[in-house]
């Protein structure tokens, strides 16, 4: 541990970038009683935080040297790196927590750049919108320097009650975030297609849920077995073989067409199932379709 990186109960925290998310982050530290320094390209966007007790830094260098823990949340990882550049060697021995969304590759570039300057580095993938920051249920996936994570765990805990270090690799949290969002969009698109189908019959979607909610809610409970099948590369048909899925998907496409409902989504599913069955996987479970998505 260097002399700038000493642990105390409430180390000085710097927040660079006080847009919607950065302001929520700085607010969480202020509420937690942490000495908080803020810097933003448009200085006026720090006014509200200053009125609540934050110190405004005149320059990025000034902001970085205010304490051992430097958080950054801006639009784009290129911007994050360019903003930190003037601080240069002042980053040595400090911990940079980058909370800027991006691809795993973009995040790893910032991590390598920060490591070259002697900084400890964590990437944090925030899984909530700004008003959710600090909520006990808010998840933040961290990746990077484990010692830095442990050192600042109490401070990081202020951002969300479900913060977890998921990897020593700073790029991994970005993938976790995308995996959650991808799953969410797939599920929501399926539900909204179903909602359009029901609405076309004049059925209230809420009423459908009263009757069929248990069937819908049971679906996430299948995920652990599907995950195991993917990891083991074994596709036992525990929850229905693809040959059983096929006629149901055909019906969904047919029903959608008959009602003038967009059939692209079920049609896509039909294409996947038909191809897998055609390739000899009729008796496999649904997890077999992971091969279509290009698993290596
Ligand atoms: N808002 C949310 O609910 C939410 C939820 C999850 C994740 N996020 C993530 O949080 C990060 C910040 O988003 P936000 O919602 O706070 O965005 P925002 O309200 O639009 O603010 C953008 C921030 O980035 C700064 N910025 C952008 N380009 C810059 C540049 N070239 N040089 C210097 N500063 C630059 C802005 O400075 P100026 O004020 O000077 O323009 C501002 O501080 C993003 O990665 C976003 O995906 C946000």
Image (cartoon, helix red, strand yellow):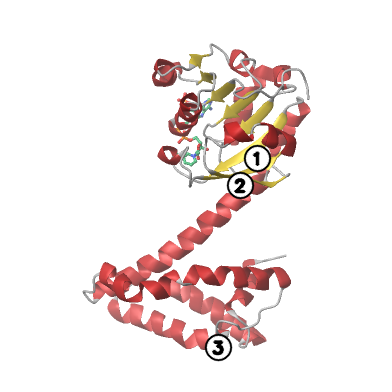
Say the numbered circle drawn on residue 174.
Answer: 2
Q: Residues within 10 Å of mark 3 (few under 14, many from 20)?
A: some
Q: Which percent across, then down, holds residue 28?
A: 48, 30
Q: Residue at x 63, y 47 (%)?
A: 173
Q: Residue furthest front?
A: 9
Task: Depth check: give the residue in front, 77 or 222.
Answer: 222
Q: Residue at x 65, y 40 (%)?
A: 107
Q: Residue at x 44, y 85 (%)?
A: 248
Q: Is residue 193 above or below residue 22?
A: below
Tag 3 and tag 2, C-beta contact below 8 Å:
no
Question: Mark 3 — residue?
Answer: 243
Mark-to-mark CA distance, 1 and 3:
42 Å
Q: Which percent across, then down, holds residue 292?
A: 62, 71
Label 3 residue SS: helix
Question: Mark 1 — residue?
Answer: 107
Q: Residue at x 65, y 84 (%)?
A: 279
Tag 1 and tag 2, C-beta contact below 8 Å:
yes
Image quadrant in which the C terminus is located? bottom right
Q: Earlier in the sequence, mark 1 or mark 2?
A: 1
How many marks on residues?
3
Mark-to-mark CA distance, 1 and 2:
8 Å
Q: Residues within 10 Å of mark 2 (few under 14, many from 20)?
A: many
């Amino acid at each position: 541990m260097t002399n700038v990186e000493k642990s105390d109960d409430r180390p000085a925290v710097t927040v660079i970038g006080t847009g919607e998310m950065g302001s929520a982050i700085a607010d969480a530290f202020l509420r937690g009683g942490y000495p908080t320094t803020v810097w933003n390209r448009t200085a006026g966007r720090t006014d509200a935080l200053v009125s609540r007790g934050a110190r405004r830094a005149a320059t990025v260098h000034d902001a970085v040297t205010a304490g051992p823990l430097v958080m950054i949340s801006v639009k784009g990882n290129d911007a994050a790196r360019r903003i930190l550049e003037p601080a240069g060697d002042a980053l040595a021995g400090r911990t940079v927590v980058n909370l800027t969304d991006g691809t795993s590759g973009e995040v790893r570039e910032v991590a390598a750049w920060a490591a070259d300057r002697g900084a400890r580095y964590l990437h944090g993938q925030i899984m909530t919108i700004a008003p959710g920051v600090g909520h006990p249920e808010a998840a933040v996936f961290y990746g990077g320097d484990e010692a830095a994570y442990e050192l600042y765990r109490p401070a990081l805990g202020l951002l969300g009650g479900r913060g977890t270090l998921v990897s020593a690799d700073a790029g991994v949290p970005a993938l976790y975030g995308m995996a959650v969002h991808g799953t969410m969009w797939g599920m929501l698109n399926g539900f909204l297609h179903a909602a359009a189908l029901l609405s076309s019959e004049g059925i209230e979607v809420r009423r459908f849920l009263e009757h069929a909610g248990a069937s819908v809610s049971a679906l996430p409970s299948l995920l652990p077995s599907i995950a195991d099948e993917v990891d083991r590369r074994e596709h036992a048909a525990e929850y229905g073989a693809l040959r059983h899925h096929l006629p149901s998907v055909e019906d969904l496409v047919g029903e959608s067409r008959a009602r003038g409902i967009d059939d692209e989504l079920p049609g896509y599913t039909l294409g996947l199932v038909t191809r897998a069955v055609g390739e000899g996987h009729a008796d496999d479970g649904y997890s077999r379709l992971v091969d279509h998505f290009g698993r290596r």
